[in-house]
Amino acid sequence: MNFDWRFFIDLGIISAALVLATWLRSKVKFLQKFLIPNALVAGFILLPLYNYVLPYAGISSAGLGILAYHLLSISFVALTLKAPPRQKTSKGRIFNTTLSVLLEYSIQGLTGLLLTFLLIKTIRPDLFHSFGYLLPLGFAQGPGQAFSIGESWKAFGVTNAGNIGLTFAAIGFLICSFGGIFLINYGIRHNWICKDKIQFLGKKEISSGIHKKGSTLPVGSYQTTHTEAIDSMTLNLALVFLGYFITFLVLKGLSFVLSFAGKPGEQLAATFWGLSFIFAALVGLLMKQILKVTDTQHIMDNLTLNRISGFSVDLMVTSAIAAISLVVVSKYWLPILVVTGVGAVVTTYSVIWFGSRIFRDNRFFRTLLIFGVSTGTLSTGLALLRVVDPEFETPVATDYTYASGLTFAFAIPYVLTINLPLRTYATGNPLWFWAAVGINVVYFLFVVFMFSRRAKGRIFKHMGTLWYPE
């Protein structure tokens, strides 16, 4: 019987690459020194294979982008189903963390859009006007968002944005890994980290990524059910997949309603499908509230949900990088280098300058985490934080967990307006493009205004100094 094996062939190839990458991480000091995630290594192993070797065996990369798209939303359902952490935290620190992330959204958006305008007026008049938005999508949000939103732009006549978005995300991961380690060493040399942490780093062995034989292993998950009835992992996965199925039904319903509005409605529906991770997160929050109201939230295990989310992100990152079409990238190599190069410099400088002034405790730790999530994903940001705070003894990671929900709420209007420049590309009317620029300016001014109120005199003192002295 001839069954379709394409999904499991891709999954098997990705799995083989992840196993090889894990072995390489355990042996190669370079990968250990720069904390290169195994999923990133696996993705770059598969990148040339899917472009130049596997097509001869009839295996294409078409399914990889689809896999990354679905895994993104699945990870969002798993994350939003988690019960909030119980550690004590500070509303002030949470809001300051949210401001830091929103600042990078606006700065990267402004940088990308203005550079796109410059490129269109000079060497690339055929460039689509939303090209610059792939900078915050790929850097600050990750490969899943960059691909899914980029793919939704096909409704506006842009065919390669999803693939280019994956390229932005891959470059962001590299900047996060190499730039993050450079930032740590730079902070040590300039006394941005307290002396006891400097001594610890001097003695710390760089992790191979695998726990040593015979060592005490951390708990990865807990059982919330009796196994003879149903395995706890099965129940947690079932609720996550149920949430994603409900997301599909919601999007199907919205698409049906919007179809009565003609082509504008169809374009908006395509946008919503590209933003499926937002709807997935909202469904996850709704399901969590239902479990709370029915007093059944205890059947969910946060650690198990972490494993599901981690599994989804690892596979998503690997498949996203492997899905990059080098033929498409070669056509846009100069705009990509210009936008990512300038974006990396602006992001690094703004994160350090802002972080050293807005935060009052664990300033470098918080700044390092914001740098990681502004160029990669939460996973890479936490990997950088773990170098200086291996046991997460500080409240930095917990504060970010709370802040991510608040950031998500603030960012929804931002994400929903990302398609505005495409209207300029489709109609030739420049007002839509400048409206998008204006939205980024509004976000930027909001952050600066709140910063001036919360940081008080720090915004005016030592303005030319990268790291605020204390």
Image (cartoon, helix red, strand yellow):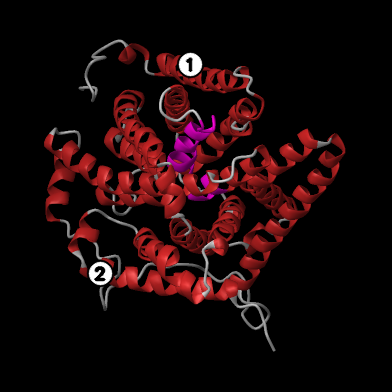
The correct choice, above or below, for 460 with respect to 272 in the image is: above
Residue 445: mark in rendering = 1
Residue 201: mark in rendering = none
The x, y position of residue 204, in whole percent, is 17, 56
Give the residue displayed 40% in from the left and 47% down from the top.
Answer: 330
Question: Could you give the CA–CA distance between mark 2 and mark 1, rounded to whole angstroms?
Answer: 46 Å
Residue 26: mark in rendering = 2
Image quadrant where one finds the C terminus = top left
Q: Compare residues 54 and 146 and report the one nearer the observer.
A: 54
The x, y position of residue 16, in whole percent, is 41, 75
| Corner quadrant of residue 301 | bottom right
The correct choice, above or below, for 283 with respect to 16 in the image is: above
The x, y position of residue 459, in whole percent, is 33, 14
Give the residue displayed 60% in from the left and 29% down from the top.
Answer: 425
| Corner quadrant of residue 39 | bottom left
Q: Amino acid at mark 2?
A: Ser
**What range of the chain is rendered magenta?**
126-147
- Is 347 positioned to the left or the right of 308 in the image? left
| Residue found at the far right of this picture | 260
Are there few (<14), some (14-19), or many (20+) residues within 10 Å of tag 2? Answer: some
